[in-house]
Image (spheres, rainbow, N blue to C red):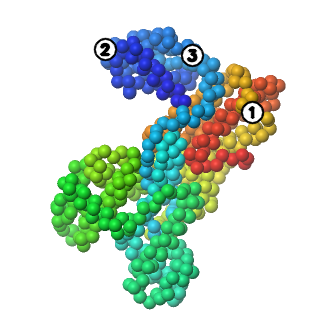
Amino acid sequence: MNIFKLYKNKFSEILLSNNYQCNFSKLTVEPPRDPAFGDLAYNAPLILSSNLKKKPLEIGSEISLLIKNNFSEFESVELVKPGFINLKLKKDFWFNFLSAFGDNKDMLILEKKNINIEYVSANPTGPLHVGHCRGAIYGDVLANLLNFVGNKVTKEYYINDYGNQIHMFAKSVYARLLEINKKVPFPSDQGLYPGDYLKDIAKNMINKNVIQNLSNYDVIKDQIGTMAMNEAMLMIKSDLFSLGIKHDIFVSEKELVSRNLVEKTIEILSEKNCIYEGILAKPKGNENEDWEPRSQLLFKSTEFGDDIDRALKKSDGTWTYFANDVAYHAYKLERKFDKYINVLGADHAGYLKRLKACMDALSNFTSDFECKVCQLVKLYKSGEPYKMSKRAGDFITAKELVDAVGVDAVRFMMIYRSNDSQLDFDFDLVTEKTKENPVFYVQYASARIYSILGKVKFNEKDFDIKNLNLLNSDVEIDLIKKLSLWSKCLEESSKNLEPHRIPFYLYDLASSFHSFWNLGKENSDYKIIENKDSNLVQARIFLLNKILLTLKSGLSILGVTAPKSM
């Protein structure tokens, strides 16, 4: 139950019944900045003042009186400048809240949409490196979150298995085959992919004993390309598995091209009068003196919010990468999702407008389409940055990162910052067993609660809810209040596609629990199970059960374990 949303709706009903008119969407009920001010802060006086041509404090006095006359659960209703109403709930409210917390799963259902999330979609020319990790984990956690609040989510990977980069990849694998079978030195001057992982791909292909003759590349290039791509995707899926990620569907660019979907999509855009023959201006920053303007087939993306129109054909008459991308998004629309989300890396930030333009053009502005960009990850160890360069074959793979610190630490820390902020991943920090290491501190709270629960017998069905009124200390009430923020966290996280709010909340909840546990070492009155009052012990165990339930739910969304011991 999101109590903030609940009271916003209740207060709005009171205002309407008393003929107050305003834009109710602008009214908010939020936690006050300082908990000392109360439990809820209502901004209605500020919003209504301009409509009613009255001073905020004058309107606030009227609304405060309405609240006092219609709600008995508030201990205090205080009007403060410049026009907020601060409200404090009685302890009985919090006991009732705790008794029902987590019982009704339907209370967590916020939406029931059919959502497509495309994420990772790394070029299949090598293993996943750390640069892919953040977008991979962001997309996966976002999918978990949207599923958790009631949506049906399809997790999709788009395989870029068509074009020149794939030809170069096949040539690189062929060179490794010659190196292994014929002792031919791997060429260093042909722009091939030099990574050692190509040796593993080549060895796997040799073990399958399908290609018998390596003497003529042109004869076997298609066979090599197909086999190499299959091996590369097996490697990538293994890398994803090590990160705890499993997609529902893989869509092949090559297959879409073979089905003539590009031509069909261009025809659709042509019928919509979204295509023309024209000449693009010289690209900004292009100092090539040999550049010459030429007529091209162009998409009118500027009519849909893009900065420039986009080329659909290359000078050799083949389709551009963007044309294939347009066809892929047309294929997404064919499958009729309620919402489409693309998760892109920082190097693809420039694609946002053109992708939105193509979706708007194809759907006549009816598609709910959104791109989220994950900024760069910088690795640090012993105070020194780690560097990686996929092209040079010198990079840190996702598996290496997982092997170094564990999948739980990788998943938690990769989502611990907003996706649009750069993330510094500190190897030393994530292996510390201190409060400064968020993933350790949250998991330690889980292990501690499990340990406590293992020492007592507790059956929630036999528990007398009336005993919850024994939880009357400020620290216990504060823990209940912290639980009340969980539904709000879920709602805001899913609405804004901001899953980083989840680990922040879990860390805050874990910190509050640890503080409560440590208080028992200083003051015997706060001991959780070593207490003479058995009813109080049972009440505290009831509270800890609810905290554990929340920690487990949050960690499951993150794809992180809730350990029973550490």
Residue depicted at x 51% and y 89%: 182
Q: Amino acid at mark 2?
A: Lys
Residue topped by disc 1: 459
Residue depicted at x 51% and y 37%: 109
486 vs 434, nearest the viewer: 486
Residue depicted at x 61% and y 55%: 407
Residue 377: image x %, image y %? 49, 54
Residue topped by disc 2: 53
Occupied quadrant, residue 257: bottom left
Q: Amino acid at mark 3?
A: Glu
Using a 10 Å C-alpha cutoff, classify the residue at mark 1 as few (fewer than 14 neighbours), some (14 to 19) or many (20 or more): few
545 vs 44, nearest the viewer: 545
Using a 10 Å C-alpha cutoff, classify the residue at mark 3 as few (fewer than 14 neighbours), some (14 to 19) or many (20 or more): some
Q: Are marks 3 and 2 in contact (CB under 8 Å)?
A: no
SS under mark 2: loop
Residue 384: image x %, image y %? 56, 58
Kindly give the residue lying farthest to the right in the view shown: 532
Is residue 61 left or right of 263 when viewed as pictured?
right
Mark on residue 73?
A: 3
Viewer can see residue 14? yes
26 vs 38, nearest the viewer: 26
Mark on residue 316?
A: none
The quarter of the rendered structure image containing the N terminus is: top right
SS under mark 3: loop
Occupied quadrant, residue 322: bottom left
Looking at the image, is 19 positioned above or below residue 274? above
Of marks 3 and 1, the one in the foreground? 1
Residue 316: image x %, image y %? 24, 73
Is residue 316 left or right of 557 when viewed as pictured?
left
Structural distance between the alpha carbons of marks 1 and 2: 57 Å
Viewer can see residue 283? no
